[in-house]
Image (cartoon, rainbow, N blue to C red):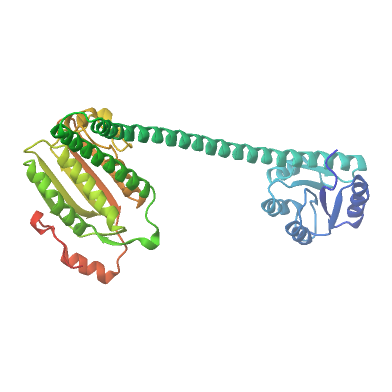
Amino acid sequence: MPEPFSRILVVDDEPGIREGCRRVLVPLDFHVEVAENGHEALRKVRSGKFDLVLLDIMMPDVSGIDLLEPIRQHDPDIVCIIITGYATVELAVQAVKRGAYDFISKPFSADELILAVTQGLERRRLTLESHRLAASEEKARELAEAKEALERLDRMKSTFMLTVAHELRAPVAALQGYLRLILDGYGDPEKQRGMLVRADKRASELLTLIDDLLTLAHVREAAPTETRARVQVHKVLAEVIDLLRVNAENKGIALSVRVDAEPTVLATREHVRQLWTNLISNAIRYTPEGGEVSVSLAVDDGTAVGAVADTGIGIAEEDLPKIFDEFYRTRTAKEMVNRGTGLGLAIVKRIVEAYGGTIGVESEAGKGSRFEFRLPLAQQSPATAAAAGAQSGPCDEDEAKPTSP
């Protein structure tokens, strides 16, 4: 038997059929309501929660078959059983096509009614149970995915912490070794001075690593909206070029800058400065003496497009997928520059993605690299956009200097 208190609606224009169904079903612990026409039936269906509808096919206002669609629109799982005195194969086919579960012919006995109703309610129960199981399975899948994501995050955090500990241990151990030698009185003052110089160098490397770790932590998410500002990317670029030009000149590297537009982005000035600094300083660091580094800035499809290209050592194809990973340095990079945190490009990627941008790299071992990032432009008023368009234009490296907005 179905669960007690199932709600049944009997729709028939004959009072005898309505009351006869009520007398048979109420003693079986069903909640039974009646309607004498189609309009009353629709009103009751839409205002209540019924499990099954006994629906007369011939009524003065609306055909029972025509009621099937609006009833099932309200509740696709409601069970509709047609009551008819004109049982034919064609009628049965039509009723099933329109969404009826079954039909019973007048006149019908109490046993026939009870059998049709109990089978219909069992169908309703099984349908609802399947929905619950599907929802439970979907929830279980979501929970499993969330659990897997948390476990993956825990593994990443553990790996990151182990890597940080390893990277910090080497310079700290070197510092401790030099200090112990000096404390033990090893060597003459000149040798001790050499130890202090080396200790100072390792301390500087340690501070650089700590600074990069702090920066990486700070750029895991974009700055809050209330702390962002309109940053003129070309002006920040000019400042970075002024600071890094001497590094390029010391290596005999030709540093060129091309600014084809003066875009504004919504970010923090410090993040934009770090973005340019890390890309350009990396290009200079890994380009041999006499090489070239070129920097460009443009606007394309609503984004500020920055690019840094060099004629340096390049990146092997197998290293490209890992180049933005934290602490990752290629073998060639380690051979050329012994010391490095391996966090510069990871910081660049974090900054770009934090502000909804993208970054990519094209490179070939021994033939140089080209990094390109895109950041969404800040929204401008029509007047500001027109003024910016009138002022912007291509310029060479000597023109990449701060200008009035």
Q: Who's the residue at 21% across and 48% down the image?
A: 277
Give the position of the C terminus as an image quadrant: bottom left
Q: Position of residue 215 (x, y in %)?
A: 32, 47
Where's residue 311, x and y in %?
Answer: 12, 37
Q: Left or right of 119: which side holds 178?
A: left
Say whether residue 340 is left or right of residue 168: left
| Residue 378 in the image: above or below residue 76 | below
Residue 122, quarter of picture:
top right
Q: Do we see residue 304 in this rendering?
A: no
- For the N terminus, which image quadrant? top right
Q: Is residue 85 left or right of residue 165?
A: right
The correct choice, above or below, for 254 with respect to 381 in the image is above
385 or 119: nearer the viewer: 385
Please give left or right for residue 279 compared with residue 101 in the image: left
Where in the figure is residue 401, as x and y percent of width and height?
13, 60
Instruction: Work out whether residue 265 or residue 91 is closer to the camera in this orientation and state it.
Output: 265
Q: Position of residue 355 (x, y in %)?
A: 34, 52
In the rendered image of this protein, does residue 363 appear above or below residue 220? above
Foreground residue among 120 and 158: 158
